[in-house]
Image (cartoon, helix red, strand yellow):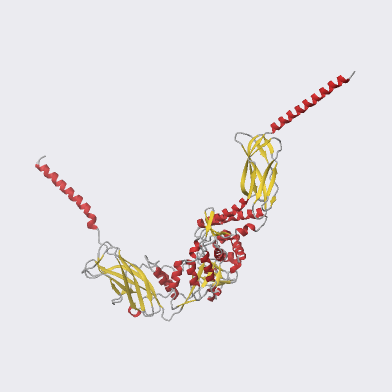
Amino acid sequence: MTPGRQRCWALLVTVLTMLIVSVSLAPMAQAAPQYEATVELASVVTDDVGVRLTGAITSTGTDSLFRVQVVLWSDTQAITTTAEVDAAMSQDLTAEVGERLDTDDATTVVVSGRESFEPGQKAGFSVMATWDELGLTDKGVYFVGVDVRASATQWGEPVTIGHGSTVVTVVGDTVAPTVTVAMFTSQPSLIHDAVFTDDHLAGELTGRLAALLVLAGKPNMSWVIDPALYHEISVMAQGYEVMDGESTVPGKGAAAAKQWLAEFEELNAINGYRLPWGNPDLALGMETGSVQLIADAQAGDQAHPDLSGLPVLLWSANGPINDAWLTYVAPLRARVVLADVTSAATVTGGVVLACAKTPFPNGPGPTDGGTPVQRVQRALADDLINQSPLVRVVQSQAEIDLANQTIRSWTRPQSLGSINPSVAWQSSMSVGDPVPVLTATTIGTVTRLRATAEAYSSLTGDDTAGDSLALVPLSAGVSQSWADDASAEGYVLSADHWLRGLFNAVTMSATPEVSLTAKTSTFPVTVTNTMAVAVHVRLVARTTPDPMSLGNVAIPATDVITIEPGDKMPLVLSPTILREGEASLVLQLTTPDGVPIATPVTVAVHAQESAWMGWVVVGGAFILFIAGTFLRVRTMRAKKVSP
């Protein structure tokens, strides 16, 4: 290769190398420094003097920070109406708003001098100011918050790299009424007698339900209980079993149940109400036109009248109600209806009260609006702004904690009974149609259980026996305490499995193989009843021909047979041979209404009518042979006697 060509190749390699290096380094050169921080509020404390905010900041950028500060700010524009509060919660509060304070108490210096604040590092802060310093002196709701300020260098001017906000209330001499309702409900678990599907109540009685008791015991707190839950806890207190596959194990909550019941009895009954039995999904009942759903709730109240002295309260768990819903629930004769409506109103026999769809909605966001601190501050803002008390239904542990935090010196708890609407219900007060928690799928599953209960009633001859046994799961199966259809279905199917299992106490036995050698032959069957009550059954049979044979026999269904407790009833079946050959005869016990019960019994049948005819021929020939022989002997003797 010539020197000139060598130089060309060297130059080309150099250029390519530079291109590769430049491409590989391009992303690094283009990557801009990131200086960001997030704010997490831990507490907002207000009093007559001012406000203190505490929390933590975290560096979420990629580069070191210097001269990091957290500075308190406020927006002096007062929010004075419910509409303004709702609008304010949806604002984009990531940008700087309000005016920062330059007082020492309003600033927390996180790092200074040569010290750096590295990516991922976290630090706490506490800032405070008086209402005068903040410029917040008039009654109202105001935005306050903190800015995170930092510099990219030790000598640079700090800029805002993070932002946090919340709302505070300036109350003046305001006394705001509040209404909190402790709602005692739980996912059903009692199947029958003292047997439960699981033991979740044992934990709730020392946790959530115990905390709910404490809240309900505070002055002027209203409370509502599902009578089915009260019944479950009463059963637990006497000792109970929990399902474990096909067997059961002892439950662990008997002592907790006794303690809970004792404390429940101390609640002020004047502030108490009861739900319909099982807390049924009334919106589902209305949507599907289920009259039975109302009837089951009423039957439960009559069968377990422990709380019958309390007035009935209806609660639309998903919020809205309408005229159709009110008409559907009228047979329950509710004293109070809690729903998401535009205002409180009177209805026949009671009142409809405006209830918060979400007891503690999110505060300012967008990233931390759902934290407990933000939700408490939002609730206090609602309490200050609302002209009439907003009913909050509290159930979960988180809601209980928030309810306790929203009690202030300027809030005045009052009971449901103290709210007296002055206007009658109008259709325009509805904000939408009720939405069921469950669907028609659950109605179908409960219908299957009801059919099993009806079969049990037919078996025992007692029209109410099945419904009485299945009363608890029939109503609890459509409870709006279930999260979804799948949860309800598992519970109802467990109840159905148990109830069907009672039929197994009626059994039948028969010889596994019979030979039929006559047009009409017989063979025995024994039916045994080990139930504690008499049963009424029929026996029906069907023939399954052998694939290799044309054999077929028929047995008519028996009349209704009554078998006393502990008895064994022998039956004689008389099959008719329709065609000779091999066949399987399936014997099935049913209720008088034809519902199959117990395990069917299969009998192998050998039907040979011609064999019977053969024996008749052989027997006849034998008789003729004997008769002929007798006549011949007699003739011979007669000849010998004659002269």
Residue 380 falls left or right of residue 555: left
Residue 609 x %, y %: 69, 33
Residue 370: name its quadrant.
Answer: bottom left
Give the total of numbered labels: 0
Q: Quadrant of the C terminus?
A: top right
Q: Quadrant of the N terminus?
A: top left
**Residue located farthest toward the top when viewing the structure as drawn:** 643
Residue 72 falls left or right of residue 14: right
**Residue located farthest toward the bottom when viewing the structure as drawn:** 173
Q: Work out whether 222 lies above or below 277.
A: below
In this view, the residue in front, 460 or 282, is: 460
Task: Inspect this view and state whether residue 391 appears.
Answer: no
Q: Work out whether 183 lies above or below 447.
A: below
Please name the residue shown 12% across and 43% down the image.
Answer: 6
Residue 297: name its quadrant.
Answer: bottom right
Please name the residue shown 64% across and 45% down the image.
Answer: 509
Residue 581 falls left or right of residue 633: left
Q: Work out whether 461 lies above or below 256.
A: above
Residue 46 x %, y %: 38, 76
Residue 440 x %, y %: 54, 56
Residue 474: name its quadrant.
Answer: bottom right
Residue 29 x %, y %: 22, 57
Task: Inspect this view and state whether residue 586 appears.
Answer: yes
